[in-house]
Image (tube, coloured by chain):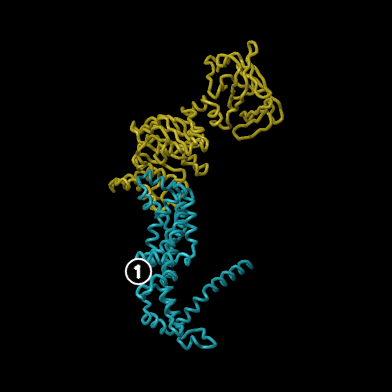
Chain colours: A yellow, B cyan
């Protein structure tokens, strides 16, 4: 167990910046998720923490000690790789014991630790097999076991579940969560899967373009995304985002996006900039309502397509020349081709000005 | 069904064609002198071992065999000692101009031996390597290295780099990673390279003839070639000696075959 601190880490490959000024503090015993689209730099950041890559500038501190000059082996970290990286010429038992043997841990301690990890992961019957005789899920367990026997300060996971099929991924996800709660270990977990991120983490660090976009509790990243990227990246289907121009006409503020113009209610005024500026308006599909429930914004939508997800429906509409996706109850009588009024409850709106979230007035009735 | 028949016929005729000369030599080696000279030829030998006796004892075949073992064996070991680190570095480390290095290596291996024979002889003369086994081992190593490095580099490149990352996290330095993880996984590549080097060094005739002029140092190909007398061509002895020279190589290849199984790294990554 340990705490990790990153101080303005930057990394460039051949003058191409991959990470820009990443500062992050990971508290002891937390499960931190590095989430982002592929190529955002999250795996590079993990490799820098592990010591497999070196940063261009900045420091990595584990338990307050700078570790930048230490090779991976001396940082007391364990890493679970995307493709498991089991040693194919060694049995499961030897795979588990390898790191301990390299550290010259006494034989009987190794045996105890291997037995303990095998018991925890329920892989005792596999100990004498070679990796090639294991299924994907079993290999994943062995890979985790190899990290557990070390009792490291820090566990690093590099998209460990991405190679498993959907069903196995779900069950391994639950096991991993239980494991973390049991070991109370500090874990850093890289993924591009927002479901994994939301369910596993205590904290999600959203990375895009080599920068931290938001570092927050999972629920926060969903209910209060810090910028339009986080808003569109977290949540399926993604949040509806309309970029538009805000103009004042007398006492009224008008929002114009494409060929669509509608007035913004007076309640929002405290949050809006005083003069004309560009504004991004967001609403999640599940927050759109079909009945008038003030205070809300009303627009007229043309229903284009309905997707039946089983539990509910996804309604794809057009509002003016803007597209919109709304989630609706199965029992709704909306059909494709009809025009319907839809409502955005004010307290569910997300406003972004110059790529930053603007908080709505707290006085808004919910 | 017809396609399978065609395929089987193709395979049988190809194998038969390449085996025929060997078979003829094998048969000849068990014949007697009269059977060899008989017209029409005798197909099936009487099973005489006379030629083996003369080849082994009168023509010192054992000495040549021993020389070949020494020369080919040390060539293989020395070439691998250099090729393994070189190939690993070229496959894994970020070396400026490494594609260029590999290209130059390939070019070097394409030089005709005849073109470099003179300089090599002069060089070895100056170094005092003429009529010494190391005098042939040196050019053999130089000539086999490019191929060995190419084979090994492509093997190392195919090993998942994640394994080496895992080894580093687990506490291995570069050398222990090489010996504990990379080499065990590259065994098929190492054996493939080793066998190719061994076959080259075992069969090489030209440099051996040039550099080893004393019968005490000569290797099998040279020794056998010098069997012929001034007026006679001892076909029987040649056949017997060729069989004796080929058997060790076949043996080594058969034994090593079980190591040249690819897919040894199966199960390392998702697979």
The residue closer to the viewer here, B130 or A217, is B130
User: What secondary structure is found at the residue carrying circle 1?
Assistant: loop
Above or below residue A125? Residue B130 is: below
The residue located at (36%, 78%) in the rendering is: B60
Q: Is residue B3 left or right of residue B197?
A: right
Above or below residue A269? Residue B239 is: below
Say if residue B267 shows up in the picture.
no
Q: Given the image, what chain letter belongs to the residue carrying mark 1?
A: B
Q: Position of residue B164 (x, y in %)?
A: 41, 47
Quadrant of the image containing the C terminus of chain A: top right
Say if residue A16 shows up in the picture.
yes
Quadrant of the image containing the N terminus of chain A: top left
Task: Quickly name the residue at label 1.
Answer: B132
The residue located at (42%, 74%) in the rendering is: B222
Q: Is residue A289 left or right of residue A95?
A: right
Q: Dot 1 surroundings within 10 Å: few (below 14), some, or many (20 or more)?
A: some
The residue closer to the viewer here, B186 or B146, is B146
Q: Position of residue A307 (x, y in %)?
A: 64, 34
Q: Residue furthest top?
A: A250
The residue closer to the viewer here, B211 or A252, is B211
Q: Position of residue B240 (x, y in %)?
A: 43, 79
Q: Quadrant of residue A112?
A: top left
**What is the number of callouts on the image?**
1
Q: Position of residue A258 (x, y in %)?
A: 67, 24
The residue located at (66%, 21%) in the rendering is: A299
Q: Quadrant of residue A247?
A: top right
Above or below residue A212? Residue B253 is: below
């Amino acid at each position: 167990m340990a705490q990790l601190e990153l101080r303005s880490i930057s990394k460039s490959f051949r003058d191409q910046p991959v990470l820009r000024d990443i500062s992050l503090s990971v508290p002891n015993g937390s499960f931190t998720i590095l989430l982002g689209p592929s190529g955002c730099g999250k795996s590079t950041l993990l490799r820098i923490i592990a010591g497999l890559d070196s940063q261009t500038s900045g420091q990595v501190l584990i338990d307050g000690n700078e570790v930048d000059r230490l090779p991976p082996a001396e940082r007391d970290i364990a890493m679970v790789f995307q493709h498991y990286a089991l040693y194919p010429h060694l049995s499961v038992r030897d795979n588990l014991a390898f790191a301990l043997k390299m550290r010259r841990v006494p034989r009987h301690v190794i045996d105890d630790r291997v037995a303990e990890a095998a018991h925890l992961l329920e892989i005792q019957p596999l100990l004498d097999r070679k990796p090639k005789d294991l299924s994907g899920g079993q290999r994943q367990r062995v890979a985790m076991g190899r990290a557990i026997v070390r009792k490291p300060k820090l566990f690093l996971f590099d998209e460990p579940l991405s190679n498993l099929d959907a069903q196995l991924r779900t069950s391994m996800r639950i096991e991993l969560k239980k494991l973390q709660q049991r070991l109370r270990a500090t874990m850093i977990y890289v993924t591009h899967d927002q479901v994994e991120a939301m369910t596993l983490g205590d904290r999600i660090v959203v990375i895009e373009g080599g920068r931290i976009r938001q570092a927050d509790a999972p629920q926060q990243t969903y209910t209060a995304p810090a910028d339009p990227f986080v808003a569109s990246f977290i949540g399926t289907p993604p949040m509806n985002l309309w970029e538009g121009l805000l103009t004042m006409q007398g006492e009224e503020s008008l929002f114009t996006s494409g060929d669509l113009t509608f007035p913004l209610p007076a309640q929002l005024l405290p949050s809006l900039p005083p003069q004309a500026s560009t504004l991004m308006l967001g609403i999640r599909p599940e927050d759109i309502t079909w009945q008038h429930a003030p205070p809300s914004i009303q627009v007229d939508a043309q229903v284009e397509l309905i997707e039946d997800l089983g539990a509910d429906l996804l309604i794809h509409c057009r509002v003016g020349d803007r597209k919109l996706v709304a989630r609706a109850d199965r029992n709704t009588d909306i059909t494709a081709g009809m025009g319907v009024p839809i409502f955005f409850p004010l307290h569910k709106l997300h406003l972004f000005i110059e790529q930053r979230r603007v908080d709505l007035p707290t006085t808004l009735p919910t | 069904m017809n396609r399978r028949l065609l395929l089987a016929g193709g395979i049988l005729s190809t194998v038969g064609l390449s085996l025929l000369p060997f078979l003829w030599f094998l048969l000849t080696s068990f014949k007697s002198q009269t059977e060899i000279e008989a017209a029409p030829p005798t197909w099936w030998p009487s099973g005489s071992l006379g030629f083996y006796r003369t080849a082994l004892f009168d023509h010192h075949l054992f000495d040549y065999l021993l020389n070949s073992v020494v020369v080919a064996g040390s060539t293989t070991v020395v070439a691998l000692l250099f090729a393994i680190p070189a190939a690993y570095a070229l496959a894994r480390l970020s070396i400026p101009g490494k594609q260029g290095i590999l290209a130059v290596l390939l070019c070097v291996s394409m030089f005709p031996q005849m073109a470099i024979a003179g300089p090599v002889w002069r060089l070895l003369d100056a170094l005092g390597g003429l009529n010494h086994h190391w005098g042939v081992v040196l050019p053999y190593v130089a000539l086999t290295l490019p191929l060995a490095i190419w084979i090994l580099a492509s093997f190392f490149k195919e090993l998942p780099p994640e394994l080496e990352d895992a080894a580093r996290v687990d506490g291995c330095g570069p050398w222990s990673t090489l010996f504990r993880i990379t080499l065990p996984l590259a065994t098929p590549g190492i054996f493939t390279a080793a066998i190719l080097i061994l076959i080259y060094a075992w069969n090489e005739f030209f440099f051996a003839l040039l550099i080893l002029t004393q019968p005490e140092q000569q290797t099998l190909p040279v020794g056998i070639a010098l069997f012929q007398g001034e007026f006679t061509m001892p076909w029987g002895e040649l056949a017997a000696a060729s069989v004796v020279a080929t058997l060790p190589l076949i043996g080594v290849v058969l034994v090593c075959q079980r190591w040249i199984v690819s897919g040894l790294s199966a199960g390392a990554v998702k697979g």
